[in-house]
Image (spheres, rainbow, N blue to C red):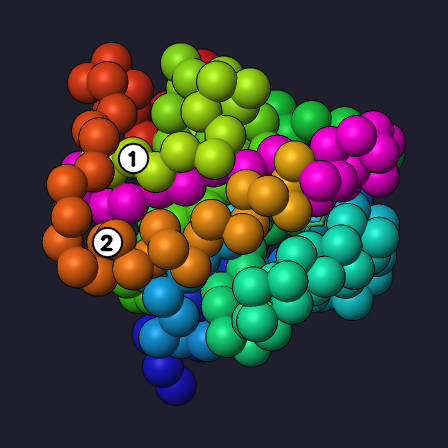
């Protein structure tokens, strides 16, 4: 068993918070183990909970379209969420649920060791950078603690607000050059030190 598979076993049998009582399936994440890009969403919705896979509902369809717009497919990247079990009724995850799940995302980052972490939406952004606002940092590349981060609106936001569709497409269009910049070791702005509270939301 690989270390990632061992982690998945822990996640799907996890009982560290109350979400285990209402989930159908935990959703560990999926994609290439050597992915250069890791996408981090908020948490499973109805369809993800049913199937045990991330981003398989309407937001996932748009995410696939966004990946396609930069010539990528799901299997080229790694996709996961801040919390691995669906909060009932798709409410926001609670602080203790985020806390209970924190070791899993930290370990995924360690194992995948992506060149670039792309946060999808406000919630994922806050996990890494609790003080930042998505409207201000979207479309920008920053570094913190030796890792590179890029931020976009959540794909589901475009389903509720059609104007955001093009904004998200435009932000995705910058990802290939952003990766190039990191690979070439070009200087990247550091996030404010006050932001360095990885995963400490509350
Ligand atoms: N929204 C998310 O944040 N994650 C999913 O897996 C699906 C929808």
Q: Position of residue 94 (x, y in %)?
A: 61, 24
Separation of marks 2 and 1 at Cα, in angstroms: 10 Å
Name the residue at 82% across, 56% down: 57
Image quadrant holding the N terminus, namely bottom left
Question: Which of the two residues, 22 or 150, is positioned nearer the viewer here?
Answer: 150
Q: Quick check: is the Cβ at mark 2 less than 8 Å away from ligand 1?
A: no
Label pair 2/1, CB-CB below 8 angstroms: no
Q: Position of residue 158 (x, y in %)?
A: 78, 37
Name the residue at 42% across, 66% down: 7
Query: Would residue 52 be found to the left or right of residue 107 on screen?
Result: right
Question: Which of the two residues, 187 or 117, is positioned nearer the viewer here?
Answer: 187
Residue 135 sits above or below residue 181 on the image: above
- Residue neighbourhood size for the residue with mark 2, other residues' Cα within 10 Å, grouped as few (<14), some (14–19), many (≥20): some
Residue 190 sits above or below residue 104 on the image: above
Q: Which residue is mark 2?
A: 182
Query: Would residue 161 be found to the left or right of residue 149 on screen?
Result: right
Q: Which residues are magenta?
A: 145-166
Instruction: Classify mark 1: helix, strand or loop.
Output: strand
Q: Quick check: is the Cβ at mark 1 less than 8 Å away from ligand 1?
A: no
Query: Would residue 187 be found to the left or right of residue 117 on screen?
Result: left
Image quadrant holding the C terminus, namely top left
Question: Which of the two residues, 35 or 109, is positioned nearer the viewer here?
Answer: 35
Name the residue at 15% across, 48% down: 186
Query: Would residue 163 be found to the left or right of residue 193 on screen?
Result: right
Instruction: Classify mark 2: helix, strand or loop.
Output: helix
- Residue neighbourhood size for the residue with mark 1, other residues' Cα within 10 Å, grouped as few (<14), some (14–19), many (≥20): some
Sequence order check: which comes first, mark 2 or mark 1?
1
Residue 84 sits above or below residue 54 on the image: above
Res. 142 mark: 1
């Amino acid at each position: 068993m690989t270390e990632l598979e061992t982690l998945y076993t822990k996640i799907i049998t996890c009982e560290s918070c109350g979400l285990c009582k209402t989930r159908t399936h935990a959703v560990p994440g999926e994609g290439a183990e050597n992915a250069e890009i890791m996408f981090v969403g908020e948490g499973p919705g109805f369809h993800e909970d049913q199937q045990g896979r991330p981003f398989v509902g309407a937001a996932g369809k748009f995410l696939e379209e966004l990946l396609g717009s930069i010539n990528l497919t799901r299997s080229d990247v790694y996709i996961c969420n801040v919390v691995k079990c669906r909060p009932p009724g798709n409410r926001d995850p609670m602080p203790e649920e985020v806390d209970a799940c924190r070791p899993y995302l930290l370990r995924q980052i360690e194992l995948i060791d992506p060149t670039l972490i792309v946060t999808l939406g406000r919630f994922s952004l806050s996990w890494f950078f609790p003080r930042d606002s998505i409207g201000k940092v979207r479309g920008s590349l920053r570094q913190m603690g030796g890792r590179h981060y890029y931020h976009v609106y959540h794909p589901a936001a475009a389903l509720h607000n059609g104007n955001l569709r093009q904004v998200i497409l435009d932000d995705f269009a910058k990802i290939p050059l952003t990766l190039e910049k990191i690979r070439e070791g070009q200087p990247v702005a550091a996030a404010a030190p006050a932001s360095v509270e990885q995963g400490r939301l509350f």
